[in-house]
């Protein structure tokens, strides 16, 4: 008796079915893009509303300046309706800074104090402050008088306008004034900025600036590793790696001398060079929980996504809804289309996609939960193609999800699915990535037909990786695949694509194409009683 993973495919091995040449796609008149995606555009998550600014102030031995700085921070003008909070982290000061902070905070409830028992550095203080912040936008403010809080409004402007995710206040752009000080410091800053730009492919003028204003949803999901001044190049590398929209605005600058309390030295500059190189290679962009390291590594395997796009491309129409779009790798392979809606529940991915397509009016980004029927209200019959790739296995009620896909398709429209195949393969890798199940070919076909679809095609994908997945997931019980393994596989994909068709075992995944019948009398089949096949 054959294992479910070895059930016969709808197509012969090596075949890639295409829509028949005599069959035409649905020919109803295409609605305007705005009308097509308006239910998505009206979603409240589409518009970022910024109501609170979190001002992070790392402090170390600033007894003579800290109260003056905090008064300026609290008195700085903000846009109407925007609140502020001030998060101060004292990094084990050895002077009277702590006493003055407590005295000041006692009369100002907007100021919240946190203390380190031992000196750890500016990066460690900011890391703690970020965790304690509750605002929608975050700005870093040094506890001296070099940066003027009255310029918060200038930094906020690109974010509030919806253009930027990150704004740097540049000391080297044209500004009303700046204090003339150390030439070698200025030269060192320009060198470090240029060196950083070489690794991040940005054209910043001032990477080392303290004034960095960031949307909180981004900064709170970036792991900060540097404890000291290395935080400046680290954040820059990670903003670039996350694809953030970065703007610069000119700011005034009143630098201090070492007699006045300046702390950064030439040694910090040397360590910055190492930090720039390290975080370019490390690609440490996301929190470690929830399998982020696998997720980001998979996002860099571009040739795999091109392979998938080539397989499903013939069934993809001009008005597309892609569910579980991740970081948009497949989206880029399938664009352009008349209208393309990408949906992603994960807030990290949603932010990334919104940044990526902020200037493309053909693309709408939304947070749609495929397992919620309410989320699809107003979208009935709007699309000729729905893509649900590598997502259905993570939905608790996959039958409801398939019915939602059926609802949004116009008659004659198609749903393209890619799911993990072979129930016997389910193991540690699946659990770590949040998979609830793997599918047999017969079970997937049954669920599609139950939702009302006519199954047009069903075939295996990625046979070459099935033995390695079984070994890692079932035998070694691994929780992740190393990015080097994925990179190596991706770089040699041209070999595996040709070999894949000749292998005798089923693929790691199954691709299925379901068509919504044109006949108005076709209705979804009622679920079978009893326990169904997964």
Image (spheres, helix red, strand yellow):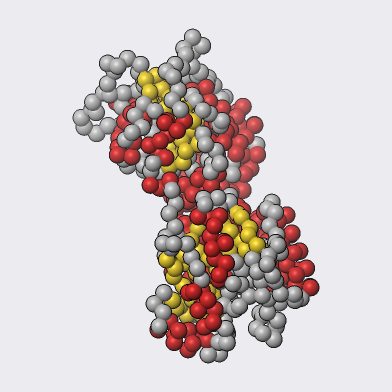
> In x, y percent, where is residue 20?
49, 13
Judge by depth and name the residue closer to the eye, 493 or 448. 448
Q: Is residue 191 left or right of residue 158?
A: right
Name the residue located 56 percent from the left edge and 47 percent from the top edge: 297
> In x, y percent, where is residue 474?
45, 45
Name the residue located 42 percent from the left edge and 18 percent from the top edge: 28
What residue occupies the far top of the structure in this picture?
22
Q: Is residue 37 above or below residue 472?
A: above
Q: Is residue 310 left or right of residue 403?
A: right
**Which quarter of the picture shows residue 233?**
bottom right
Q: Is residue 13 left or right of residue 226?
A: left
**Which quarter of the picture shows residue 252?**
bottom right
Q: Is residue 239 above or below residue 462?
A: below
Name the residue located 44 percent from the left edge and 68 percent from the top edge: 84
Q: Is residue 343 left or right of residue 62?
A: left
Judge by depth and name the residue closer to the eye, 175 or 321. 175
> In x, y percent, where is residue 79?
47, 62
Residue 89 seen by the camera? no
Residue 340 seen by the camera? yes
> In x, y percent, where is residue 143?
57, 77
What residue occupies the far left of the structure in this picture?
529
Judge by depth and name the residue closer to the eye, 395 or 379. 379
Name the residue located 70 percent from the left edge and 81 percent from the top edge: 257
């Amino acid at each position: 008796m054959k294992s479910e993973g070895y059930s016969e495919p709808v197509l012969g091995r090596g075949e890639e079915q295409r829509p028949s040449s005599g069959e035409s796609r649905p020919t109803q008149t295409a609605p305007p893009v705005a009308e097509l995606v308006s239910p998505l555009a009206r979603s409240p998550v589409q518009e970022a509303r910024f109501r609170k600014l979190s001002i992070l102030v790392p402090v170390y031995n600033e007894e003579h300046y800290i109260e003056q700085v905090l008064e300026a921070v609290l008195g700085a003008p903000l846009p109407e309706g925007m609140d502020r909070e001030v998060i101060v982290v004292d990094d084990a000061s050895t002077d009277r800074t702590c006493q003055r902070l407590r005295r000041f905070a006692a009369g100002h409830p907007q100021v919240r104090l946190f203390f380190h028992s031992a000196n750890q550095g500016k990066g460690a203080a900011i890391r703690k402050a970020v965790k304690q912040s509750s605002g929608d936008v975050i700005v870093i403010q040094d506890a001296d008088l070099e940066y003027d809080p009255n310029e918060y409004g200038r930094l906020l402007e690109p974010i509030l306008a919806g253009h930027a995710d990150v704004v740097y206040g540049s000391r080297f752009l044209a500004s009303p004034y700046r204090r003339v000080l150390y030439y070698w410091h200025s030269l060192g800053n320009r060198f470090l900025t240029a060196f950083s730009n070489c690794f991040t492919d940005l054209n910043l003028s001032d990477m080392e600036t303290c004034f960095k204003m960031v949307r909180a949803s981004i900064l709170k999901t970036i792991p900060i590793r540097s404890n000291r001044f290395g935080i400046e190049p680290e954040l820059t590398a990670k903003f670039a790696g996350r694809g953030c929209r970065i703007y610069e605005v000119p700011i005034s600058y009143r630098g201090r001398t070492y007699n006045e309390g300046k702390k950064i030295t030439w040694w910090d500059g040397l360590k910055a060079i190492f930090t720039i190189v390290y975080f370019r290679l490390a690609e440490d962009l996301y929190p470690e929980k929830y399998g982020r390291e696998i997720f980001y590594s998979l996002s860099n395997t571009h040739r795999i996504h091109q392979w998938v796009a080539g397989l499903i491309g013939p069934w993809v129409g001009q008005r597309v809804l892609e569910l579980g779009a991740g970081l948009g790798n497949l989206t880029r392979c399938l664009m352009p289309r008349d209208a393309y809606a990408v949906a992603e529940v994960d807030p990290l991915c949603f932010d990334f996609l919104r940044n990526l397509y902020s200037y493309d009016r053909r693309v709408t980004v939304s947070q749609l939960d495929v397992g919620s029927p309410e989320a699809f209200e107003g979208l009935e019959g709007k699309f000729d193609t729905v893509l649900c790739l590598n997502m259905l296995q993570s939905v608790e009620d996959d039958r409801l999800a398939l019915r939602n896909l059926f609802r949004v398709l116009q008659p004659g429209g198609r749903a393209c699915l890619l799911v993990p195949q072979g129930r016997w393969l389910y193991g540690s890798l699946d659990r770590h990535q949040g998979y609830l199940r793997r599918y047999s070919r017969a079970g997937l076909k049954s669920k599609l037909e139950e939702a009302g679809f006519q199954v047009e095609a069903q075939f295996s994908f990625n046979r070459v990786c099935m033995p390695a997945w079984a070994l890692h997931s079932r035998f070694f019980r691994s929780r992740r695949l190393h990015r080097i393994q994925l990179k190596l596989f991706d770089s040699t994909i041209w070999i595996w694509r040709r070999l894949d068709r000749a292998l005798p075992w089923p693929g790691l995944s199954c691709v299925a194409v379901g068509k919504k019948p044109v006949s108005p009398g076709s209705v979804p089949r009622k679920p079978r009683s009893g326990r169904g096949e997964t």
